[in-house]
Amino acid sequence: MSRKPSGIGILDELSDIDAANVTRCARTLLRRPLLRADGPDGDLLPLVFRHRNALHDLFASLLGYRLVVQRRYARLYKAGPGADPTRGEAGLSPRGYAYVALTMAALTGVGRQVLLSRLVSEVRAAAVEAGIEVVDDLGDRRALTAALRHLLALGVITETEGSVSTWSGDAITEALITVDTDVLGHLLAGPVGEVDTPEELIGKAAEAGPAGMEQTTEHAVRRKLVENPVVLHADLPPEQASWLKKNQRRESLLLDRCFGLVTEARLEGIAVTDPEEYLTDLAFPSSGTVARVALLALPELLAEHEARADGRHPVSRQRLQQICAELVESYPAAWSKQATEDIDGLVDEVLELLVNTGLARWEEPDWLLSPVAHRWVPEPDDTPGGPAAQEKEEAPPPPASWSLFDEEEPA
């Protein structure tokens, strides 16, 4: 007899209403790992607090995630993306991310309130101490401002007086910043004290939980299913791929019941979708010139070469550029003029979108399309002259003058 999934077991111990609420809260925490009463979806924090024990057990048993719930905030310590370059916060450049880390370090020693000018000085001093070159130009100021505004959005700092904004001259527009030291203490997920290099920190943050081999494999695979739209067997280590093939039916039931996610199992792997699109941070297909060009380009790109053994299709940038140019030329009124003025730039944006959605990746010497791209290859309803077409042709048309109220002629 197969073992009952622990997550479903937790929900089975609750009433139907409570189980539905726990699932709703779990979805919210996956979307908002730092949930605050005054932030997005903050109205659900009282419900999270009420079901904190069930949620703690759910995340610990299924994903190996640690959950901290207080009345003012809840923090879900999710695994980091590892070396994946496609996951990131919109509006933050690599330098902006560096400033987020440096600002967090500076905030630990400034107390509960600090002037913006002093905070900027502390951040730049921390950069120098870390061996990071500081160039006080407009680009650097924008990166630092983006980092500060990101911490404002997270609720780590608030603007008590004045505002954090990009300064154009030498002088900073002064502002009084208040620091939420409790939230700051829960912001960093990686075990900084256990590592010596940034690479080690990234690796530690992406690990799958301190348990035995079977449980670690379970956590690692399930995290990929929850956090990514597509998980291919070829992209997993052999033991994880074997585990997923063996347990994919059970996982489908578990993800649906506990997180409201729908899975599609295919030969190459599993696709996971959220019918409500709440957990989707990047929708595809979608509106916009880049997304529509990418969608129309996929069938022609897939037809270019036979798939490899792992199901991926090699395509060249040159072929994608040719397809983009043909689409722009054939339907000039269908696209944003700004997006199509530079075909090279359009190709870059299409590739970036395909990479970010998991549909493409670079592997020397070609780009490789994921087998999941076949989802968007159009299929005709019927072939010309097929049964459906013949039936349609053979059906006699009604008399031109016939109506529902015509009297039948006598036999």
Image (cartoon, rainbow, N blue to C red):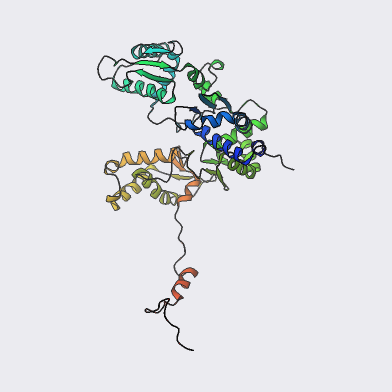
Give left or right: position of 377 versus 2. left
Which residue shows up at 42% across the image and 48% down it? 298
Residue 47 seen by the camera: yes
Question: On screen, 130 above or below 294?
Answer: above
Q: Residue furthest left?
A: 169
Question: On screen, 158 above or below 363?
Answer: above
Give left or right: position of 133 versus 27. left
State the residue in front, 130 or 388.
388
Residue 386 seen by the camera: no
Give left or right: position of 156 versus 248. left
Which residue shows up at 40% across the image and 13% down it? 113
Q: Residue furthest right?
A: 1
Give left or right: position of 231 versus 89. right
Quarter of the figure that contains the N terminus: top right
- Which x, y percent locates residue 381? 46, 62
Which residue shows up at 52% across the image and 32% down it? 29
State the residue in front, 164 or 64.
164
- Which x, y percent locates residue 115? 36, 12
Question: On screen, 145 above or below 385?
Answer: above
Q: Quadrant of residue 254?
A: top right
- Which x, y percent locates residue 191? 55, 19
State the residue in front, 277 or 170.
277
Q: Quadrant of residue 288?
A: top left
